[in-house]
Image (cartoon, helix red, strand yellow):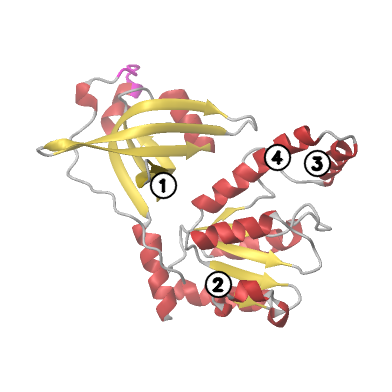
Amino acid sequence: MNVLKDSSCYLAGPIDKASDYGKGWRNSITPFLKELGVKIFNPCDKPSHLLNESAESVQHRNRLKLCGKFDEVSKLVKEIRNIDLRMVDMCDFLIVHLDNNIRTCGTWEELFTANRNKKPILVHIEQGKVNVPDWLLGTIPHEFIFSRWQDLKNYLVEANIGNKIWIIQSIERFIMNNVGMGGRVYGLENIATKSGASMAKFRLQMPRYKKDAFYIDVISFDKNADFVNQHVKEGSGVFVSGKLDEDSWEKDGTKQRRLKIIADRVEFLPINQKKQESGNSETDDSSVPIETDSEASDSANNIF
C-alpha cells in the first residue's frame, strides 16, 4: 500500500530569522518525501523566484523599514504571505519545524490556518517534545509532535503502509478530496499576479441527464494556468483533475458555501485535441460530450 502517493505536503518553519533562511531542513527532508511519492510545497522555492526569501531580500526589507518605507515592505510581504497561505490551502498535510530560539510569525499563522481546516500537521521541535509550547498541545494531538527527525520519518513510513487506524482514516481524505470532472469552460478569467505567477479562473459546466447543468468553480496556477491562458477559450471542452475545496461567506446573516476545484491538471477533451491538431481552435456545441451525472461532495475532515 502506498497511501501517501500523490498527496501534497507544505513545509512550514522559520525563514527570515533562521541562519540558513529555512533551507537546510527543507532540503534534507525533500528527497525522503519524494521517495514516498509526496508532492512538495516549499515556501523557499515559490512559483515566482522574485518572492523567494534570501539574505538579500531580508536585508532589503530591513533597509526599507529603517527609511520608514513601511508601505513598500507591506506590499512585498503581502505577496509572500498570499502565496504561502495559498500553498497551505492547497496541500494535504503539513510538516512544521519549530525552534524555540527563532522568533517566527508566519509559521504560526500557517499552522493554525491548517488546523482550522482540519489538515494533518506533523511537528518537529528542535528543543525536544518536552519543550513544546503548551498551547500547541491543546491544538494538535501530541502523537504528531516529534523530538527527532527520524521519528517523524518513521511515522510517515508507517502512514504510507496504512497499518494504524488513524492512518487508515487519512486514506479516505486523500481519496475523497481528489476529483476529476469534464465539461465546458465559461466565465474564463486570465490573471497575471503582481508577483509574476500565473493564475486562471473559470466555471466548469457539466451537462446532466434530464437536469439543469451543474457548475463548479475552477482555479489553476503556474503551468496549468499558463496552459489555460494560452489555449483555452470560452466554451472549450476540458477535463479537470485536482483537489476539492470550499469557499464560505456570510450574506444577510446566512452562511453561504460554494465548492471549487484547485486544479492539478487541465487538459482538452479528446474531440478538442483533434480540432487543435487540425488547426481549428474554435469550439462548437458538439465539442463537449454529454457527461453522466457527477455530483461534487465535500471532502472528509479526517486526520492521520
Label 4, label 2: how many angstroms apart (C-alpha)? 30 Å
* Amino acid at dot 1: Ser
Q: Nearer the viewer, residue 231 or 206?
A: 206
The verdict on residue 280 being magenta is yes
Do the numbered discs 2 and 3 sit on residues whose CB atoms are within 8 Å? no
Q: Dot 2 lies on which element?
A: loop
Question: Which numbered marker is on residue 201?
Answer: none
User: What residue would you read off at disc 4?
Assistant: 51
Compared to residue 113, the image places residue 185 above or below, namely above
Q: Are marks 1 and 2 in contact (CB under 8 Å)?
A: no
Q: Which residues are magenta?
A: 276-282
For this view, does 54 lie left or right of residue 304? right
Tell which circle, 2 or 3, labels the residue nearer the N-terminal end: 3
Q: Please, is residue 301 above or below residue 74 in the view?
A: below
Label 3: which secondary element: helix
Q: Which mark is residue 140?
A: 2
Magenta region, main secondary structure: loop
Q: Closer to the observer: label 1 or label 2?
A: 1
| Residue pointed to by mark 1 | 248
How much space separates mark 2 and mark 3, taking CA atoms? 33 Å
- Asked if labels 4 and 1 touch by Cβ distance under 8 angstroms, the answer is no
Specify few, some or many for label 3: CA neighbours under 10 Å numbering under 14, 14-19, or 20 or more: some
Q: Position of residue 235 (x, y in %)?
A: 30, 24
